[in-house]
Amino acid sequence: MKYNLVKDLINLVEEFELSKINTFSKDIEGFKKWICSEKKKAKPNAEEPYWEGKEKGRSAESIINTLIVHLNRYAKTYSKAAIHDSDFSTQEEFIYLINLKALGAMTKMELIKKNIQEKSAGIQIINRLLQQGWVEQHDSALDKRSKIIGISEKGIIALEKQMDKIRLATKVVTGNLTETEKVELIRLLSKLEDFHQPIFAENLASSELLDKVVTQYLP
């Protein structure tokens, strides 16, 4: 027996509970009112958007992947502009510092995984930060084989010096989206993040990655 309707209902309730809207009480009456408000916001008979190659059979999955790749490249271009004429070499350097400042000290591998990077690339970034004196490291009290990385006073100064331009770059990336559209985009991207993060954490070999994702993660 299939329970697609029940699954959809559970997902909808989860979306309601996670919503930041305080207008509705978190009970069945609030849920019903929220459903009605969402229906009103939805555009009736909204036309499906056009994308290049659609008439030739190009799939929605294909254009989504292409748009994500393009947006990543646009964001990198703005990030380069934000660190122009600074001591930063790459956007990854200031992203690592932002994470350390916001989340506190952590092991090298925790920091690398937080930025969704391979170990070798992450170690190179951390080494550059150490050379600049922007981070400090010491042995972990829990595992002597691990190093704990924390942002230094010099790193905080370097980050703050560039933060106005970094904030401007992040604002430019969101372009002409309205506040409502930004919130909706966060919801959709967070859903994708929640799907992909545990897969990435498994560190599967390329030879088995796609087959395992298809059989274990996709509905």
Image: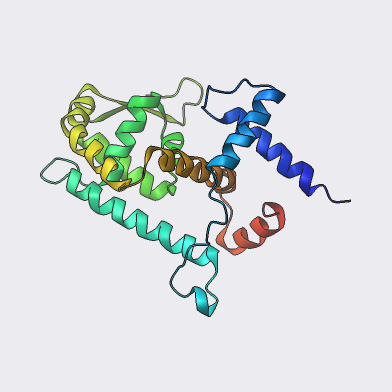
Q: Residue at x 52, y 26 (%)?
A: 21
The residue lying furthest to the left in this view is 85
Q: Position of residue 157 (x, y in %)?
A: 18, 26
Please say if 21 is above or below 169. above
Drawn side of residue 141 relative to residue 90, left or right? right
Please say if 212 is above or below 110. below
Drawn side of residue 117 relative to residue 167, left or right? right
Drawn side of residue 117 relative to residue 95, left or right? right
Task: Please tell me which residue lies in front, 120 or 91.
Answer: 91
Task: Please tell me which residue lies in front, 54 or 103.
Answer: 54
Q: How is the image coloured?
A: rainbow
Q: Quadrant of the C terminus?
A: bottom right
Q: Position of residue 163 (x, y in %)?
A: 21, 33
Q: Residue at x 42, y 47 (%)?
A: 117
The residue lying furthest to the bottom in this view is 56
Q: How many marks?
A: 0
Q: Position of residue 185 (x, y in %)?
A: 46, 44
Q: Residue at x 69, y 22 (%)?
A: 27
Q: Quadrant of residue 116?
A: top left
